[in-house]
Image (cartoon, grey):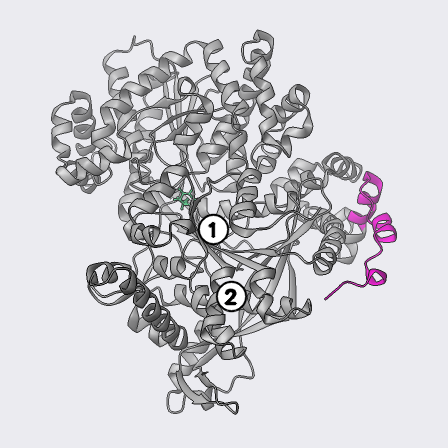
Amino acid sequence: MAANPTTRVPGGAEAARHGLDAESLQRDVLDNLVSLQARYPAIATPHDWYMALSYSVRDRLLLRWVDTVQRYAAADVRVACYLSAEFLIGPQLGNNLLNLGIEAQARAAMLALGQDLDTVIALEEEPGLGNGGLGRLAACYLDSLATLQMPALGYGIRYEFGIFRQAIRDGWQVEETDKWLQKGNPWEIVRPDVAYYVNFGGHTQSATDAEGRFRVRWTAANQVKGVACDTPVPGYRVETCNTLRLWKSEAVESFDLADFNVGDYYGAVQEKVISETLSKVLYPNDEPEMGKRLRLAQQYFFVSCSLQDMLRLLELKGEPIERFADMFVAQLNDTHPSIAVAELMRLLLDERGLQWEQAWDITRRTLAYTNHTLLPEALETWGLPLFRSLLPRPLEIIYEINRRFLDEVRQRHPGDESRVARMSLIDESGDRRIRMAHLATVGSHAVNGVAALHSSLLRETVLRDFAELWPERFHNVTNGVTPRRFLALCNPGLARLLDETVGEGWIADLTRLRGLEAHADDAAFQRRWRAIKHANKEVLAQHIQSATGVVVDPRALFDIQVKRIHEYKRQHLNALYMVALYQRLRREPQLALAPRCFVFGGKAAPGYAMAKLIIRLINGIAEVVNNDPAMEGRLKVIFFPNFNVKSAHHIYPAADLSEQISTAGKEASGTGNMKFMMNGALTIGTLDGANVEIREEAGAENFFLFGLRAQDVERLQREGYRPADHVAAHDELREALDLIASGHFSRGESEVFRPLVENLMQWDHFLALADYADYAACQARVDAAWQDPAGWTRMSILNTARSGKFSSDRAIREYGDRIWSLAPIG
Ligand code: GFP
C-alpha cells in the first residue's frame, strides 16, 4: 500500500499534545491515571503511577510507530522478519525513556507528582519470554534494528507464563510460576483484527483443480486462532519505532468439532483444550524430549501466523506473490522456527497455487538460518509419528523436499549412500526422526554461526556435508549486545564518565570507546574509574543482602558467573576451585590472598537433575563458607536467586572478574561475556565461543586465559579421557572432591552430592577435571593482578575501550550486508 501523503499522521499537532517536556508528561501521567487506571493521586498506588507513566511514554512511542509504519509502507524496501520462539526483552520503561531521551523530563514530572522515578521503574514486571542468551540476543537485535532504522519485525509467542521464577529453599532450586501479566502490561497493543487460523491434525486429500492442476487439501482435526499482540520497539534517539509482534492462541469458536471428529468427541475436546493452552507457557531448555507435543505445536503456530502475516502485508503493499522474497527476509533464530521451510512452501503451493519450483525459489530466497549450538542433545529432532499426527501436510512437503534434495546429493556424489543417509532430512538410524537443522539448512539461502570459532566448527562438524555442497551459503556473524541497555542504562555512573571522556556518540557507535585508551594510565582517571566500580558494587551488595541476607564487602574482588546452569558452562569447575580455596585458607590463615566474593546466578531446567545439583552444591558451599568466622573478610559465596534481565542490570556493572569457563568448543558464543567486558570486568576464560574474539580485541595481556583448546578437547575424548588420572595428579583437587563427597557442604548427608562426584570421577563429559589445574593456576594470576590496583584498573579501562566490536549494531549491520541485503532507511 503506497502511503498517501495526505493521510499521514500529522506529527505536529499530535506531537504537541504528546510533548517530550516535563510539563506535558506530567499532564499526561495525571490524565492517564484517571482515564486508564480510574484512580486519582490521593489513592494511587506506586503501581498505578508506574502504569500511568508507562502509558504516557507509550503514547509518545506510538506517534513514532505510526510514522514508521507509514514510511515502510511507502518505501520499496525489504523488511527483515526475525522469527524467534524467545524474546527476552527485559523491563521496558527505563529503556524506552533512554531511547526517547526523556529520562530527565520523566524524573522531573514524577517528582512534581511526588513520586521517585527509580522506585517506579523498579516496580516493572519483567516479561520472561526467554531462557537465556538466545532470547536475549533476539531482544538486542530488535534494539539495534530500530536504532539503525532498518525495517524490521520481530515475530514470536506471547507466553502467558514466562520462564519460571527461581526460589532457593534449603539450597535447592524451586520453580514458581511466572505470572508476569497479572497486573497488566502497559506496553502491549492487542489487535483482534490481525488474526490467523492454524491447522493441526486431520488428513490430506489430493485432487486436480478446475484448471487441471494438482492440489492438496488439508482437512484439519483442529484449528487454532493466533491473535497479534504488539510491543513498540523504539530506536535510540531516532524517529524509527519498529514492532515486536507476538501471537496469542485462542480457540476458534465457530469451528464445528463434530464435522471433523465424527465419533471422537473426547479427542476433539482435548484438541480444543490444547488450542487454548498453546501460548500458555514457555518451555525451559534442556528438558527431555517427552511431552513435547505442545512445543512442536507452539513452533508451528507462531511460524504459520507470522508467514501468513507477511503474506498479508505483501498484499497490503500491492505487490504480487512473485515479489515475496524481494520484500521480506525471515531470519530463523535457531531451529525452533525451522518448520517455516515447510509452511512457506505449503502456503505458496496449497493456498496460492504456485508451482513447486517457483515456491521453492521464493522459500529459499526468503529464509536464512542461525545456528546457536553444536551440542548434539540440543539439536532439535522430531519423531515421525508425533510430527505426522500434528502436521500431516507439512510432513508430506518435507518428504518431497527431501526426495528432491537427496536426488541432488546423489547426482553430486554418485554411489555415496552413507553421505545420503548423513544428509537426509530424516534420521533413519533409530526411530525415524526429522532433523530440523538439516531442514533449516536446505531451505535457507544463508546459514550462520554466532562466533568465528563456532561458525568454523559448524562447517567442520555438524553441517560439514552441507558446507561442502554449498560453501557460499555459510557465514559467520559474531553476536553482539546492545550498549543502550547493557551500558548506558544499567551503568549510569560509567556512562557519564564515558560521555565526558569520548563524547556521547559512543552509545550509537561503540567503537568510539577506543578514545578511552589514552586515559588508561592516567592516575586521576583511574581513581574515578575505580570509584564508579566501587559504587556499583555497593549497589549490588545491597541487592545481595536483600535477596540472600548475606552481607558482602564491596572492597572484595567480585568474581561473577551468571548464565543458565549447565555442565558445559562448568559452574562446577568454579565450585571446585572455591572449595579448594576454602581449604587453603583454613589450613593457612595467613595466606596473602585477596578477599573474594564469588557470585553465581542462573536457572537450571526443571528436569535437568545434574544442573539442579550444581545449584545445591553452590548453596551448600555458601552456607559453610559464609558462616565460618575464619572466612570473614576473606571469602564469600553468593547464589543470587532468579537471575533475569532486571537483576542483570545490577550485576554486570559491579563485576571485577567475568567467568567464561565453558569447555572449549561447546559455548557457541556467549553474550554475557560481552556485557561484562563493556562494563570493565576482566575475563577469566577458555578459548571458546566469542571469548576468542574478546581476547583478540582486548589484547592477550588483558585476558586471563586457561584450559584446553577445542581441538585438544576433541582429541582427549577421542583417545579416551580418564578423569581419575587428573584427580590422582592433583592433591588439592582430590581433597576438594573428598570434602564434597563427605557431606561437609550438605549438612553431613554424604549421599547428596554422590551423583555429581561419581559423574565427575567416571565420565566428566565436559572435562572440568582436566582443566582444573590450569584454571587454579590462572586464578592465582588473577589474584596477583588484583593486588596491583593501577595495573588492574588499566586492564579494566582497556577492556571497556576495546569492546566496540561487540555492539549488536555491528552484528546487525553484518546481517544487513551479508545476509539480508537490507539497508537502513533513515
Ligand atoms: C545460546 C548459546 C550461546 C549464544 C546464544 C546466542 O544461548 O552460546 O551466545 O545462544 O547466540 F548457547 P544460551 O541458551 O546458552 O543462553
User: Which residues are drawn in magenta?
Assistant: 1-30
- Mark 1 lies on residue: 130
Residue 472, can we see it?
yes
Residue at screen point 44% across, 58% down: 444
Residue shown at the point (57%, 9%) measured from the top left: 522
Write down the quadrant of residue 525 in the picture.
Answer: top right
Figure quadrant of residue 571? top left
- 387 or 762, which is in the foreground? 387
The answer to whether the beta carbon of the residue marked 2 is less than 8 Å from any atom of ligand 1 is no
> Can you tell which mark lies on residue 362?
2
Residue 746 visible to an observer of this rendering: no
Q: Nearer the viewer, residue 536 or 701?
A: 701
429 left or right of 683? left
The correct choice, above or below, for 768 with respect to 419 in the image is above
Q: Is residue 441 above or below residue 630?
A: below
Confirm whether the magenta stretch covers residue 540: no
